[in-house]
Amino acid sequence: MNRLGLRARVTAGFAIGALLLAAAMALFSYDLTRRSLLDERERAAVRAAYFDAAVVRSGLDTDAPDVGEVLRSLDTGSARRPLVQRDGGWYARSAEIGAGVVPPELQRMVRSGEPAVQRIRTDGQPALLVGVPLSPTTSYYELTSLREVEQTVQLVGLTLTAVAIMVAGSGAALGWYATRHSLRPLTAVADAAERIVAGDLSTRLDPATDPDLTRLSTSFNRMVEQLVRHNERDRRFAADVSHELRSPLQTLAAAASVLDRRREHHDERTATAAGLVADEIARFQRLVDDLIELARAEQPAHRERVDVEALARDACRAQGLPERLVRSTSAGGDWYVDRRRVAQILLNLVENAVRYAGGPVEVRLTCDDDGTGSIEVDDAGPGVPEPDREVIFARFVRGRAAHDRAGTDGTGLGLALVAEHAAVHGGRAMVTDRPEGGARFRVELPGCRP
């Protein structure tokens, strides 16, 4: 399971934090509002019930009172409904309310001379029941509807829920905005690192971009400078060693050539040994030549108009291959590239196909409308496994096909030189599968004009 990115985590954190805070505030506000509304409505209902009870007491304080008439004289509106219990009988203004709405416990409390208040539900609606003792045989009850209060509380709850959701959304937006601006310097660091990986060692960060990241920018620039110095030192070392080795190698090669030419005058073991020495010296010479070429690879490209198709045919002839392998789809296209480097790219790609894939089946040249020239060398060999496609262009790395062909005398620098020359042009080298089977090595070089 993939972990969320830093921006997603921070945005989610802001959203969750805002939601929790808004939910807590909403619950607190809801509870406070609900209590306040209910308490206020209860106090008003109790005051009204006591007032109405006083009116009923006065109306019943006659010789032959009419309880129903007394109840009808009350100004209770539609929200309050009176009920009287007198001498074991129950009286109301309408038949919709009766003794069944008064809980027995509340009746006992009021009959004992103690006023009582209780919240109940009648006909599925919330109500407040107030009981007031009038005499040992008479009790007054008033049922007040709390429906409006409940609707108001529900509306408040929906409003607070909507506010909490909007606050959470605002928190997510704030988190996204904050991370976008906060991570911008880190994005710049990542972009700079990618340019360095691509070969642009002149990339630097501006320490003044963000005061909080000055140390990071300074350390990054110092690291790149150290890397450049190490690369330069390694390049000079490789170049110096290669040049120092060239003279004794030439002497050894001359001596080995003499021995090889006089092979028929030696016994079989000596002749075999002389042949092995000559082969290894030749391989050593190629390695030294490749090291010298790598040392020169970081120099700027000298661009000029080049007939790349002719260079491709030369590379095929150098390997004893027919020129018809070259296919150009960029007729009339002008390639402004470094002649020496492109010739090296073509020669190394064709030689690589010969050594490890039985030879190329096609060398294709194209010039796209965006000004990118492409060199593709197809072979019908075993192909390059996916895990090897990135590292195969590194120095002294040989693919699995090279290891399977242990008899080959490659140096492990041919494809590294291809990648170096492509990078100097601002291009890149890659390898993919050939649709018909095998590998397709592709080099993209900006500087082609259709």
Image (cartoon, rainbow, N blue to C red):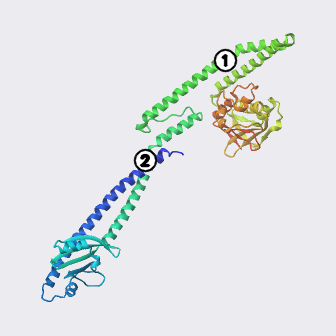
The quadrant the C terminus occupies is: top right
In space, the residues marked 2 and 1 are separated at their CA atoms by 56 Å
- Identify the residue under disc 1: 243
**Splitting the image into 4 quarters, where does residue 57 fall?**
bottom left
Task: Say which label, 2 or 1, has the lower sequence index.
Answer: 2
Residue 187 pos. (x, y %):
50, 41
**Helix, strand or loop at mark 1:** helix
Q: Which residue is painted at 66% across and 29% down in the image? A: 397
On residue 178, the disc is: 2
Which residue occupies 63% across, 34% down?
Answer: 423
Q: Is residue 28 left or right of residue 279?
A: left
Mark 2 or mark 1, whichever is nearer to me: 2
Instruction: Give me the residue at 54% from left, 25% from top.
Output: 229
User: What is the secondary structure assignment of the residue under circle 2?
Assistant: helix
> Nearest the camera: 48 or 298?
48
Q: Amino acid at mark 1?
A: His
**Circle 2: is it few (<14), some (14-19), or many (20+) Cα within 10 Å?**
some
Q: Is residue 143 visible?
A: yes
Q: Looking at the image, which residue sits at the far bottom? A: 64
Relative vertical location of residue 106 with respect to residue 295 in this rendering, above or below: below
Taking the spot 18% from the left edge, 78% from the top edge, the residue there is 53
